[in-house]
């Protein structure tokens, strides 16, 4: 009856959202921008619902990469949340970002962002070397080609990172539909962004009264 300690819970990990910015999104081709923005909305929304320790970091926001996706801004407004802007492509090599992540005091780190082969590989490999357990939300990561994204994911898996998806992330946090304190917020988020799964939830709520 005891769940695996490899499963994510709202309190056992930190989520690091890296460079979900307009200029970076323009060059993403391994998945559509629609899918990328949808999955970003799911993981950002999930982290807010479950009060996950979350860092939003950008690279050269005002001089090069531009604003974060509207779906991320809606959940973590810059004015109130603050984004940690960097010059380093590897978040782990940026001292303020590194200190912010370490300050969460979580041994599991979940990463998502742009681009997979640069801005996700860097902190993933670096965190693993320091003894962290790293999870990568691969369908909320984008790159300039399918090849670049897939080779980066393979490289991280070979180093010990665990690949997951956006829907898997939110459902792993919910875990039990009897968890009423988050049930409505989770199902509402999935109705909006969950594609066919979200439509199924809408159907069940409306037609089956569940």
Image: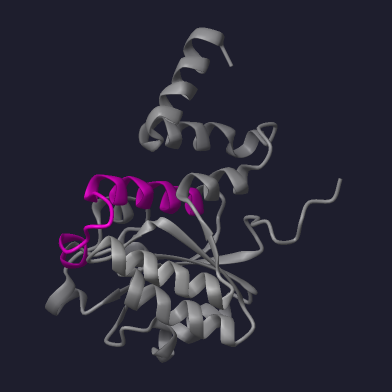
Residue 163 placed where, x, y %?
52, 60
**Residue 204 seen in render:** yes
Q: Residue 97 versus residue 6: which sits nearer the camera?
A: 6
Q: Residue furthest top?
A: 207
Residue 66 higher or lower than 132, as above or below? above
Quadrant where the N terminus sits is: top right
Residue 60 higher or lower than 151, as above or below? below
Q: Left or right of 158: which side holds 1?
A: right
Q: Going 16% across and 66% down the picture, which residue do you hit?
A: 23
**Residue 84 seen in render:** no
Q: Can residue 36 be found in the magenta stretch?
A: yes
Residue 13 higher or lower than 160, as above or below? above
Q: Going 64% across and 57% down the picture, which residue do you hit?
A: 8
Q: Can residue 58 be found in the magenta stretch?
A: no
Q: Give the range drawn in magenta.
A: 23-48
Where, by quadrant of the figure, is residue 177 drawn?
Answer: top right
Residue 138 higher or lower than 148, as above or below? above
Q: Left or right of 108: which side holds 80?
A: left
Residue 13 placed where, x, y %?
60, 65
Main SS of the magenta part reads helix
Quadrant where the C terminus sits is: top right
Q: Residue furthest right?
A: 1
């Amino acid at each position: 009856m005891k769940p695996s300690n490899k499963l994510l819970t709202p309190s056992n990990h930190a989520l690091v959202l890296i460079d979900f910015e307009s200029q970076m999104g323009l060059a993403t081709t391994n998945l559509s921008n629609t899918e990328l923005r949808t999955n970003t909305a799911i993981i950002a929304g999930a982290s807010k619902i479950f009060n996950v320790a979350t860092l939003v970091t950008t690279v050269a926001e005002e001089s090069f990469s531009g604003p974060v996706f509207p779906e991320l801004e809606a959940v973590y407004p810059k004015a109130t949340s603050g984004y940690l802007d960097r010059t380093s492509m590897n978040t782990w090599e940026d001292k303020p970002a590194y200190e912010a992540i370490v300050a969460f005091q979580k041994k599991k780190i979940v990463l998502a962002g742009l681009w997979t082969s640069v801005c996700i590989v860097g902190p993933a490999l670096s965190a693993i070397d320091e003894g962290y357990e790293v999870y990568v939300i691969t369908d909320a990561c984008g790159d300039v080609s399918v090849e670049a994204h897939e080779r980066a994911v393979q490289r991280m898996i070979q180093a010990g990172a665990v690949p997951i998806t956006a829907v898997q992330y939110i459902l792993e946090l919910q875990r039990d539909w009897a968890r009423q304190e988050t049930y409505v917020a989770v199902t509402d988020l999935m109705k909006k962004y969950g594609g066919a799964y979200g439509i199924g939830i809408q159907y069940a709520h409306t037609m089956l009264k569940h």
